[in-house]
Image (cartoon, helix red, strand yellow):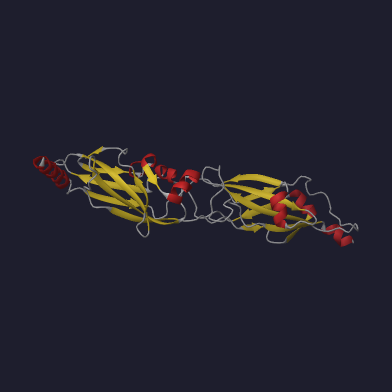
């Protein structure tokens, strides 16, 4: 029995030593997308290079860990199910699908919950550590390479025009109202989808109440641009008056909702509401010609 154990240990040492000359290099984007599924479509996100020579042979697996900055492991490869690779002479390059195979990754705690719900890692700093291990006992065959990366919470657009409490002439507003906003940051390679929303603030309401309870007078999807030109076409024809018949301004509130790269779910911006809605602004419509006559 002891002899068998010694043979096994000797074989393991032989395999380990035969791989000792393997050189690896890990390159990771410092600010990758929060959606792990999108890593595979962007080859620059993870590049893992393995260099072997013709004298080396053997099978191995890629062991990956996602850690917090304090070293706590929050995700790791399930090596019992992950793919087996055969060492090839020369350089072999692996990308995210191999280094971080989502179907073979095990995440824990809130990170597992967040990934199950949104497919995204929460915004914070992590490190990814990669090692080659043998395909049986999962003993390390190379030194571990680690890289730090940060998932940054996206910053929602800021509304520019109409600016806060701007008063627009009712006659001009019937023809066109131009809405402008800043783009979301960080900028992504994919086309961003925005939705411009405008609500009328009724008498006795606050802008926030109107935003939450009224039907929008404008609900327009915009892709790949940060401007929308609205032609109200009669929506704003009525000149509001109070109970004494005195003409007053029509108050509206507007905002922009930003969606994820697929244009399907609101952008998770780190706010409490997590709805991708920018800080709203109010503006007013006033028939200045009528007011001047009065």
The residue lying toward the viewer, choosing from 29 and 2, is 2
Q: Quadrant of residue 264?
A: top right
Where is the N terminus found, in terms of image quarters? Answer: top left
Q: Give how far across and how far down residue 48 sits, in percent.
A: 30, 47
The residue lying toward the viewer, choosing from 47 and 206, is 206
Q: Residue at x 57, y 52 (%)?
A: 274
Q: 241 above or below 13?
A: below
**Residue 45 visible:** yes
Asked whether, in this view, residue 177 is left or right of residue 39, the answer is right
| Outermost residue toward the front in this view | 1
Q: 30 above or below 85?
A: below
Q: Residue at x 63, y 58 (%)?
A: 160
Asked whether, in this view, residue 99 is left or right of residue 221, the answer is left
**Residue 177 visible:** no
Asked whether, in this view, residue 255 is left or right of residue 106, the answer is right
Q: Residue at x 72, y 57 (%)?
A: 207
Q: Give how far across and how far down residue 182 sits, in percent.
A: 58, 56
Where is the C terminus found, in terms of image quarters? Answer: bottom right
Q: Quadrant of residue 206?
A: bottom right
**Tally of marks:** 0
Q: Give how far across and how far down residue 247 sits, in percent.
A: 86, 58
């Amino acid at each position: 029995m002891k002899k068998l154990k010694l043979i096994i240990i000797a074989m393991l040492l032989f395999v380990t030593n035969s791989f000792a000359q393997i050189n690896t290099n890990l390159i990771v984007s410092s600010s990758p997308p929060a959606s792990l599924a999108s890593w595979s479509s962007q080859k620059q996100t993870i590049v893992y290079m393995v260099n072997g020579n013709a004298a080396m042979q053997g099978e191995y697996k890629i062991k990956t860990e996602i850690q917090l900055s304090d070293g706590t492991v929050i995700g790791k490869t399930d090596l019992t199910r992950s793919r087996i690779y055969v060492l090839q002479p020369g350089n072999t390059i692996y990308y995210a699908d191999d280094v971080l195979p989502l179907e073979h990754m095990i995440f824990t705690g809130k990170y597992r919950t967040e990934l199950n719900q949104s497919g995204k890692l929460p915004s914070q700093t992590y490190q990814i550590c990669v090692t080659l291990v043998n395909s049986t006992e999962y003993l390390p065959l190379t030194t571990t390479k680690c890289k730090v990366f940060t998932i940054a919470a996206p910053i929602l657009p800021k509304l520019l025009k109409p600016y806060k409490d701007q008063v627009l002439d009712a006659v001009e507003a019937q023809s066109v109202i131009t809405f402008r906003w800043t783009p979301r940051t960080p900028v992504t390679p994919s086309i961003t989808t925005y939705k411009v929303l405008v609500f009328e603030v009724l008498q006795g309401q606050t802008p926030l109440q109107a935003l939450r309870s009224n039907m929008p007078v404008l609900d327009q999807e915009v892709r790949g641009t940060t401007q929308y030109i609205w032609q109200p076409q009669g929506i704003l024809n009525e000149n509001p008056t109070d109970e004494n018949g005195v003409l007053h301004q029509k108050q509206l509130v507007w905002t922009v909702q930003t969606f994820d790269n697929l244009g399907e779910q609101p952008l998770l911006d780190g706010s409490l509401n997590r709805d991708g809605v920018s800080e709203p602004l109010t503006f007013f419509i006033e028939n200045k010609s009528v007011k001047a006559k009065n």
